[in-house]
Structure formats: C-alpha cells, structure tokens
Amino acid sequence: MKQERNSETPLRGLITLFIVLGVGGIVSALLFNSSTLRGQSNRQDPPVGSTGVFTSAHPTIGLSVRHFFGMRSEPVQPIAYDHRAHIETAMMECLDCHTGALTGPRATIPDVRWCMSCHKTKATDKPAVQQVAAYFNRGEDIPWQRVYGWNDEAHVRFNHVAHLAASVQCATCHGDVGSMTVARRVVDHSMGFCISCHKEKKASIDCLTCHF
Amino acid sequence: MPHHWGMAVDLDRCTGCEACVVACHAENNIATVGDSEAARGRAMHWIRVERYWEGEFPEVKVKFRPVFCQQCDNAPCEPVCPTYASAHSEEGLNAQIYNRCIGTRYCANACTYNVRFFNFYPPAWEKPLHLQLNPDVSVREGGVMEKCTFCVQRINAAEVAAGMQKRTLMDGEIQPACVQSCTANALVFGDLNDPESAVSKLAESPRGTKLLEELGTKPKVTYLLKESWHESRGA
Amino acid sequence: MDRRDFLKITAASGASATLASCGNPEHSMVRFIPEEELSGGVAVWKPSICPLCPAGCGMLVRVMDGEAEVIRNGKKGTIQMGLAKKLEGNPNHPISQGKLCVRGQAAIQVTYHPDRIIHPLKRSGARGTGPFQEITWDEAMSMLVSQLNGLAASGNQKAAVFLTKPMRDQRQTLISEFSSRFGASVPVTFDPLGDHVLRRANARSFGYDQLPTFDIGRSRYVLSFGADFLGTWNSPVTQSIGYGDMRQGKLQDQPAKRGKFVQFEARMSQTGANADEWIPVNPGTEGVLALGLAHVIMKAGLRKPEAVGAAGSQIAGWPGLADYAPEEVEKRTGVKAERVKRIAKEFANNGPAIAIIGGSPLAHTNGMFGALAVNALNALIGNAGAGNGESPMGFMRQPKPNADQNRHFESFIADAAQNNERVKVLLLHEANPVYGSPPAWRVRETLSKIPFIASFGSFIDETSILADLILPDHSFLESWVDHIAESGDSGPVIGLAPPAMHALHQTRAMPDVLLDASRKLAKPLGPPMPWKSYEEMLKASVEAVDPSKDAWKSAQQLGGVMPPANVSLPAPQTTRGGSPLSYSEPQFDGDAGQFPFHFLPFQSQAFLDGSLAHLPWLQELPDVLTTAMWSSWVELNPQTAARLGIAAGDTIEVSSNHGNLQSPAVISPGIAPNIIAMPMGQGHETFTRFASGRGANPISILAPMTEPETGSLAWAATRVRVAKVQSPSKSKLILFAGSLREHPEDIGR
C-alpha cells in the first residue's frame, strides 16, 4: 500500500528544526542556569537511585538518541508464543485472548491463568507449554513484552474498542499476526499511518481525538 | 452541528470549598511542585478559587471566583504558539498538544486569565503515589505547558460510548472532575450549541457575565454574579 | 545546579517510565499471578466511606488495573491489580449525595502515601527517637499477645487500655467488646476539638445527645454563630449542597426565594466569607447575642414565649430575658442594638429559619450557655428539634443511641499523669494526642512512662513514634468500612462497603488483628468474641437493622443500608436535665494587660486538626482566604499590624502563658483587632516527609482551660501577645501566585 503523505510535510521539517532548537535550549537552560534550579527542598531522599547512568530512563546516550528518533528494538519474549498455532491450527480468534479490545482502550494480554484454562490438558508435551505450566506452578505470571505501543512522549490515548466498533480489522494495524509465530512489529504506527486511515474513514483528525 | 463545550459558574452558589481544586489534581495527573517551587510561583492549579475582599473591617465582604481556562473562541494563547501546540479543537476547546510543545511559554504570557502552567521540571510522584495516576490522561514531561482541558478524556469517553450505542449525548452526561465535585452545584458543564442544555440556559441568565470579555477573547465560561438579599422580593 | 541534581530531578520523573524499555526483557522482578478478575483499562466504580472526618460521606472509588510492586511469600515482585484512581461522592448516599469535600477528594493519597508503614515494626532505639526494625506478623502478634497474657497472669487486665480517635463504626464496638471481655479499662477517645458541649446542650434542650441535622436547602434564613458549616464543621458536604439550594434553588427546579445567611464570628472563616452579613462578635458573648435576638422576637410579638418548650427551661430569666435587651447586648457583644433588632425581625419573618452554633463559641469556658441560648432561639422560632421533617433542624435517628460510653482523654490523661503505674499496655488507634494536646497536659511525658505501647496506625506521628510495636492497619480503601451517621439526613444512614482494592503492603486490618489476638490469648476471653472476622461482624450488624434476605448483598453494592426504611429503629435516649444557666463572663488564661489578644486557633480547610497534613495535595492547596500553602500563618487585623509595626509576611512571635511560637503574619481585613487567629494543622515534628518540621502548631501554646460541665478543652480561652521577630529562625509564607493580571471591577451585586 502506498502511504499517503501528509500535506503538512514542509511544515514538519520546520517543526523538527524548532524542536531541535527548543530541546537544545531547554537542555542548556537546565545545565547552565545553575542557581535557579532546585528540586523540592523537603525531600528526604531522591525517589529513585540515579548514579552512574545518563538518565534514569536512558542508561546511555545511545539509548536516549534511539528513543528520540523512535528507534525501538524488537521485543524478546520469555516464551516463544506461537500465534499461528493458536489461530490457524486451534482456530482461535484474536479476541479470545486479547479480550480487553472488546470492552476498553487496551487490548490486554491475558495472565497465565487464562493460558492454563486450556493448557492444563492441551499440548502438555510441548516444551513451550511446559514453560507456561512452570510459571503457573511457581505462582508467577509470564512477563510478556508488548510489541506495539507509543512512547509516553507521544501522548497518544488509543482506544481499541472504538476502533473495533468502527469495524477496523486487527490486521490493519497489527499485520497478519495469525501467520506469525512470535508476534513481530510489522506496521509502523506513525501519525501519518493513523491520519490516512482516519481521513479515509472520515473519522476525526482533530488533535484532541488522540492526544490528551 | 459539532458540540461547543462551555461552562457556567454560579458565584452565588460557590462556597470557596476548593473540592474542585483537588478533584482536578486527582483526575488530571497534575503534579504537586513542592514548597520551594511553590514559593517561586510555580504551583500548578488548573483551577483556582480567587478571593476578593471588599470593604474594611468590620463591614467586610468576600467574593470567591473559581478561575480556569475559559476555552476562548478567540484565544490569545493560540496564534502565538510557533509549533501549533496551542490549537483550537473542532469542539471549541483550546487544546494543548503536549508532543508539539517545545516550551516557549509564549502562550502563558499571552493568556489573559493566567491559567497555563509550565512544567519547569519533570513531574514527580514519589512511589507509590504514582499508582494513583489516571491512565486516561497523559503525564506531561518537563518542559511542556499544560492547562485545563475541560476533562477532554471524559468528553471523548462519553462520545465514544454514545457513538457505540448509536445515540446522542445527553445533557449532563459529561461532568468534568470539578463539576462532578462541586458541592454547592455552582459549576455546570454542557453543550452551548444545544439551546436546551442547562449551560446554555444559564449563559442567558441576566446575572451572566464573562471574564474580561471586553478584550475580545470570546470566553466560553459564563459567571453568574452573586446576588444580594432583599426581604421584599425573591431571587 | 550540578549534574547530580539534574539526575535526581530527571530520575524523579518515575511516572515517565518509558515504553521504549518494554522491548527488552529486563524486568528483573518477578511478575506474580493476579489475585482478582480484572477488566483491563476499564474503570469499575466501587463504594467506600470517607474516613477523614466523623461525617462519614459515602464515596465511589474508581478502580482500574495497574501494575504494583508487592511482596508475596517474602519475595518482591510486581502484580497486576485493581488500583483506586479517583474518589467521588456516592450518589446513593444521603450524606454525600454524590459529592465530596476537598479533603475527601485527597483521601486517596492516604493509601498511596510514600511514608506509609508497610509492614510490622518493633522499636529498636530509645523510645521516641525513631529507629524501628521490620518484623514479621507472627513476631508482632506474639509480642502483642504476650503483653496481654502478662497482664492476665497477674490479674491486672485493667492496666490495658485502648486510645482511639472518635469512631462511628463497628470498630468502636469491637474495641469496647474486646476491652470488656478482656477486663481492660474503658477505651479512651481523643477528641479535644469535638462537639461534646453541643451534644450535652442538645440533650438538655431537646433530649438528643447528638449533633443536629440542618436542612439548609429548605431554609430561607440561616444564622450561624461561629460554625464553619461549609468548611470543617459537622457534615460539611451535606451542608454545602444545602447552601447551594438555599441560594439559587435545586438545579432542576425553579429558583425559590433566595435565602439569607448571616454569620457571627470574630475571625472570618471560609463559611463566614459567604455571608450576606458578616458580623464580628466579642469572643464568648455569642449566647448573649442569641438571647438578645430572642428578646426582640418575643417583645415584638413575633413568637409566643411558650413556643420555646423545654429548651426555654434551660435559660435563667426566660421568657422575660430582661438582661438581654438590645442595648445590653450591644455593650457585651459589640453588635449594634439596631442591628440586633433588625436581624431578629428578619429571622422571625423569613422562615423557615435556623440558627447554628459550632466551633469557637463552644470552646469558651461558658460554651454551654452559648449552646443552650442558640437552642432556645431555635426552639422559639419553631425548630424544636423533633426531627419530624417539618422543621429544617432535627436529630437523625440511629440504630442505637450515641454509644459515648468511652472515657474522654482529658480525664484519662489527668489520672495517668498522677498515677503512672496504672496503665501498662496502651493500644493506640489513630489518635495523636502528643500533637493535639495543650502542653500543660504533659501527654508525651505521661505516655512515655507506659511500659508498652502498640500502635495500629499507618504513619509515624508524634504519638506513634513512642510505640514499642506497630501493627499497621490497611488503608480504608483496602478494608471493610462502615459508618453510622450522627447527622446529615433525616432518616438513619448506615454506610458499609467491602474493600475497594487489595492491600498494597504487608498490612492487616486492625479489627481482624484484634480478633486474631483474642483467639491467641492464653486465657480465653470471657465469653469469647462471637465473630471470626470483621466482615462477619458487619454482616451481623446489617442483619440486625434489616433482616431481609438481600440486605447484606445490597448493602455491599450500594455502599450501605440507606435507609433501612422498613425497619423501626429505637429513638434516641432522652437525657434532659441541668439547672437553668445565665450568662457568665468567659474566663481566659493570661492577664489581659500582659497578653492583650484573644488567641483563636481554627481547624484548617486543608488539614482539619492536623491529622491530614501528610497529604501533598492538601499541602499544596491554597487556603481559600489567604492563598497560603505549604505553610502556617498568623492572621491579624490591619490596624493591629500597623500599631505593632508588622507587615505582611513578617515573622511574628505569639506567646501565651504556656509557650510561644513563630509564624509569618497574614494581614486580613476579616478579623477583629483584638483577635490573633491561626490555623491548626502544621507544626508537626514527625509526620511524614511532607508535614514534618513545617510551620507551627497553635495547640502548642494553648492553656488547659475547660468547659466545666463536660470537662472539654476550651480551646478558644487563651490570651496571647505578639511581637515582630527581628531575626526569624524559620519563616516561610508561601502564597499561591496565580491570579488574573487585570481585575474586572465587579463580580457581584
């Protein structure tokens, strides 16, 4: 699919320039305007430890640069969850597990109790399923990593249920996960991607529809 | 016709209880800045209750006035923003788009009502206070301007819910946190494009005024003036 | 600023933990299996009850799932759990009617407070100095039980005593039952700012030993004698809702005739700021004024003297009231005779009308007279307090009469100070008398001599720092909660709710700890407690007032039994009595020459008596009259300030016979020249990172004056002098800077 470019492209360049200048300005203000900046005097101790790292959010400069440009590494899952086996072989639906999409903003990943509701008896010989059972037996949930999602700084408030109600298919935004084993990030959730679809469907492209 | 959100504030009801002030903090993830920043005038209260003394002891009176973003239709904050972070929404709100904001603070300087607040520092919630944060509202980072949104998260949620149920919004269905909390029912929120809405009717009240409207800002908040008591007649 | 500070600040933004990191499986912490069914991202509203003041507002808690750090089986990890996000009033609840006050809105920060005590603690240093050591619940329980066993073995059970804040729930019953079955002393309630004088006066005038309920919404004329009824007194949410209706009618209705509100007080409160007429009165003469109004009403023939009923028999000189002619009243109260006459007539002619007394008028040595006088004025104009729905003032029915069988702290501490062998085990539940008592009571010294103190509190404060053992309670959002309302509605209201969320920390509910301890005692209680858990006890209490099959279930869903209409409840006890009172001059501690000012401490809008100073939202709340935040202040009249050479913001020293304090000055037109006023709440030595070492505590200079009939602290009976401090040791007045840059002339007619 050819992506429709936003008509505001030249402006965007300008904005980026502004942003870079602005960020530089803020950083230099923070670094050099020494006497004016103090934390809350009444704190007994800082809330989070902070030595030896670039910032608490970014241990290294490299990571912060990647963050700034929206470059994200692929998630590494604790168990190689096989989407295809569940969807193509076991004939399950996305919404059987990601039930939150039916009711609210977040699609949600179910906890291990949900997995075990089938896997107490099903496919118990498979190593991955045994890993799931091991978590369950230890009283632990599986630390699945999210595949999609925006940085906090994007300030996007996405609502799954509204998109389902508008008959947007899961695959439109997430690709054909049913044919993948471990889910990979195959669709770029850039603002242009969202806007083009909103325009096509005559949904609102007001800033406040998504950013608040 | 799109909605056109507005508010009415009945100064004859307002008691100065300030429930709205904390309700707003709780709903909108507004950070406390602490004493030393507060001493520098940097406390962030999207809504405040102003107090005016009149007369001298012993013939002294007080008037309270809750002030928050007036969501001007001709907003001074909007044209001054070099990044279009201060923008007018389809439904008439003065939106602050945080990810566009680069912190010039021009908007706060331009605002007639002094209702824009700048995050001089990244906001802090000492653990586990952060567990209270409302996931429906962005947490603004340092260097970003923020302000009253009329609780746009509640507006959007109600619109989505109504849309899914294929019905129109009812008057009074949406209550921003301050309106919900207002003990004396001084605050009323609603659609100014709906002539039958409570807020539209209050906006027509003979007691109605708008704050500094002579400056041409076209504010969407109507203040109903406090009345005085006369034994012979009613309200 | 150096780089380290920069990092601290950056690090402080814990909330901006980034999604960017979610690509890496770097969660070193274990993720536990959730312990509840959660609907991701969707809010569920659960009922609860606000615990911050005795009004007992029903609330709804917005609960959403989130990830919290917890400890399970001794292991630290994260868990997906339902977390309270926002508190709002419960529309089903007749007291709150869907609203909460400013403090109720902030109550959620109690649960998430960074300085909450999160596991049991044992004292590990010298008493009162602070060091505590983490222990397990098993150790904690055996410490508690062995102390109680020790008393039982020596037959000295009376040496155990509970010290609590005033409670209006089944916890109170549980503590009383435990105490009596164990053989402990009668539990002690710490409530020095409570309304004992008014309750006693109401028993004398009307036969109801409780606080009145006012239907302000239906009133067309409200006279208030010092009562901060829109801010801190009685049932402020109900009363504020009524106030709005009194002014402009119910929202949906046609506006009724606008009601008038007159406030008499020497220092303008938040409530007084809303008055049509705010009238300063000499302290301690409010009763004279009330009888002056009654005098005019009777003399003008606007009401017959007999209308007063039994309430008149409490006033010496009724019905003639010869001593209370308007000219006499003017001499004593400072209110012009003409004004007394006018207001009396307006009051009588613009019904329904009510007179309210609360706050400092009751805190004088002659407070009883003031209360009886206002009661008589109410009775005269037709508010006999029958609670029959006809008059806008009444008394709320309760399932049983006020169980104020507890001992008052005032008498307890006097006895304990004289005979310090008596108490061996003190069980402390959410009372902070070390902070909240006048210095002459010597509370810290006396409590420090008690061999063993266990506290159930959630925070280290000035009193619980003396504890040897801390058994931290759940927060109210994590607990079964209940409340029997004393005032606020015509019918009875029993609030009740299950926990809104699971416990965040290694805490246990105080009632369940007590029940557990009772089962572990070497010598069983006689007879044993009939309930296995607090939940069971609450179920029994609901079934007692509503035997219908669904009562228990629906109470949990609605947030209480409201009202149990089909159940007949016993009427409150009638305890009239006392000989008629006439006016006596209020007594003040301190010579008028040496200490020229009356000192008026008042409960602050944010912190009440100081028990809420630990909540950051309330610290950062600008006081509505002064805009002060994060600080304490002293209010004085502009003339007084000019005479003493004091400018706004100057640090001044306030001295009484019993101590002195320093605080910045606020110059206010709403205070009489002979009054120095100061908000309570700040000046904590030890009360979390947000309140410790901030401002000054007005209670610390109060004289131990009492109202003789009840023995209650007369907290408005201290005289002080003030002086500017040339070189202040600590002074910080922080005012909220936000206001309009230009001011429109008129905001009201």
Image: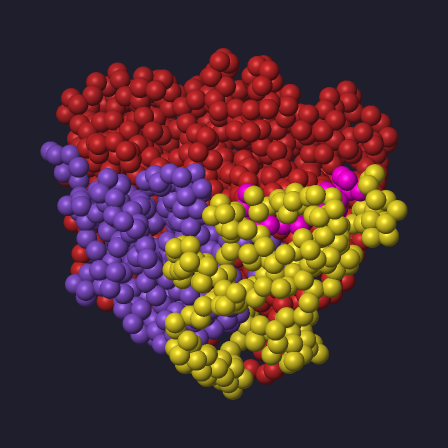
Chain colours: A yellow, B purple, C red
Residue C169 visible, this orientation: yes
How far across and down, in percent of the image, does residue C305 sit?
24, 19
How far across and down, in percent of the image, does residue C438 sit?
54, 49
Q: Which range is magenta? A: A103-119
Task: Tell me the quarter of the image containing the N terminus of chain C.
Answer: bottom right
Residue C586 visible, this orientation: no
The one nearer the camera, C313 or C550, is C550
Residue C543 located left or right of residue C467:
left
How far across and down, in percent of the image, does residue A8 sit?
39, 73
Residue A195 located left or right of residue C435:
left
The one nearer the camera, C380 or C6, is C6
Q: In the figure, C564 relative to C294: above or below? A: above
Residue A103 located left or right of residue A17:
right
Q: In the figure, C86 relative to B48: above or below? A: above
Residue at (81% x, 46% y) in the render: A136
Residue B222 located left or right of residue C161:
left
| Residue sticking out furthest to the right | A125
Residue at (43% x, 22% y) in the render: C491
Q: In the figure, C68 relative to C163: above or below? A: below
How far across and down, in percent of the image, does residue A39 sit?
55, 72
